[in-house]
Amino acid sequence: MTTSSKGLFKASVVAVSVAAASSAYSAGFALNDHSATASGAALAGAAASTSDISFSFWNPALFTNAESTTFMASGAYVMPSMDVDLNSAEDARFTYTSGGLPSQDISSDGVTQDSVDDTLVPSLYFAKPISDKTVAGISLNVPFGLSGDYGQEWAGRFHATETGIQDIALSFALAHRVSEKLSVGASLQLHQAEVVLESAVGFSGTEGIGRIEADATGVGFSLGVMFEPVKGTRLGAGYRSEVDFDFEGDVKYSDVPAAIVAGVGTVDADVTDSITFPSVLTLSVEHDLSDKLTLGLSAIRTGWGSMDGINIDFDSNQPNSVLTFGFEDQWMYSAGVNYVYSDKLTLRTGIAMDNSPVTDEYRSARTPDGDRKWISVGATYDFNDMTSASFAFTHVMIEDVSVDRDFTGSGEEDQGRGTLNADYESSANVFSASVSMAF
């Protein structure tokens, strides 16, 4: 068995780059649609809004928006599109030793379409005042997630075939009105995460599939404050902590040639790894320009730098799989307005710039991420004093990017996978809706 086949196993079978090729809505693999109300203004004012309790995702102090027992359900249907124009791909038969076999082109169609899946992102909120100034809240959100499948026949299959991740967070919060001008809040979060990773192993014509499924639990917290220094101007700040996960699962192989099994030891085994999901800091301001018009601004910093890479450990004689993410901390900026059209109808719109954490150096088939621009519109209709519904539509424009992986220049990680050069064009449409009921 050649050295490169061992590297192929080490680098491509278990490439746990969870920021993969399908989170077309938000930079990296964050999911930012936790409120149809907030989405209508592109999250402008997300940590300072008095609209409803769904803004507590960005600032737990905003559970004080509940004046009575309130339940709210919100959902976003994300419809991403990603076209991959394949320029070239070669397998990993090349070795640095004299007499090594030359690399060969991998058969595949030149363009891959529909490699990202539509996704429903749900959110639930419940708030109950326990005194005149204090509100207890519970929420269920999906802070991070993605789902994508290139298929097992495309030329980049040694880099990735399928990648999926889901992080569900259950939060328990308390919010308190310190005064008419100041509110504070905090929450404890219980996270359950699952990861699915699949790619090809071997060489073109002599290959199989390796698939990892792993899960983990984690604990996080959030803190928030909302301050209204003068009537009509609100300042808000919310912080969601990093979450440490110790993933445990297994790797299973199918259709792997016996020579590869014997040479590299690609046998079904248990796997473990530790990954830290990033923190999120949200800074917002809302200002009432008039009785009907409100301006909102937000700056959201995601600490992607905590995800520097992975180191998968196998409960067998298989060598660890190491992958570098090279993520950088990034900011999202948004501006929007709310307009009270009538006693029952509020209209809103907003724009945003969401910067990608992925650098050109480490962009891969699992991380073909680019900067995003949002354009959002939305509305809230109040049926009565107790019940309202919100709707939003967001169009996400994603920067065209290229993936250029060359194992002769990218180190051991790509020495195992082979080469890949491809251009990506992506976008997304997101439809959001929510219902809020007070009792």
Image (cartoon, rainbow, N blue to C red):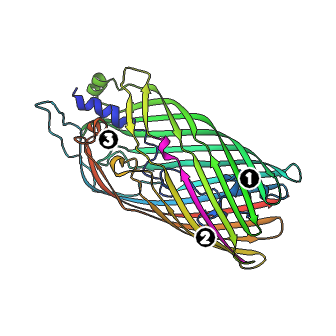
Return the residue nearer the eye: 226 or 131: 226
Give the residue type at disc 1: Ala
**Label number found at residue 29:** none
Can residue 48 be seen at all in this image of the molecule?
Answer: no
Q: Residues within 10 Å of mark 3 (few under 14, many from 20)?
A: many
The residue indicated by pointer 3 is 158
Compared to 80, does 6 lie above or below?
A: above
Q: SS for tag 2?
A: strand
**Location of mark 1 (residue):** 61
Residue that appears at 72% across and 57% down: 226
- Name the residue type under label 3: Phe
Of mark 3 and mark 1, the one earlier in the sequence is 1
Q: Which residue is mark 2?
A: 336
Task: Tell me: 351 left or right of 61.
Answer: left
Please count the marks in the image.
Answer: 3
Q: Is residue 305 magenta?
A: yes
Residue at horizontal 67%, vertical 52%? Answer: 57
Q: In the rendered structure, which amino acid carries the disc numbered 2?
A: Gly
Q: Nearer the viewer, residue 321 or 435?
A: 321
Q: Percent position (x, y) of residue 354?
A: 49, 60
- Displayed quadrant of residue 351: bottom right
- Between label 3 and label 1, give the one nearer the viewer: 1
| Labels 2, 3: front one | 2
- 83 part of magenta stretch: no
Q: Which residue is at 80% across, 57% downward?
A: 66
Span shown in magenta: 292-307
Residue 278 at x, y percent in the picture: 54, 44
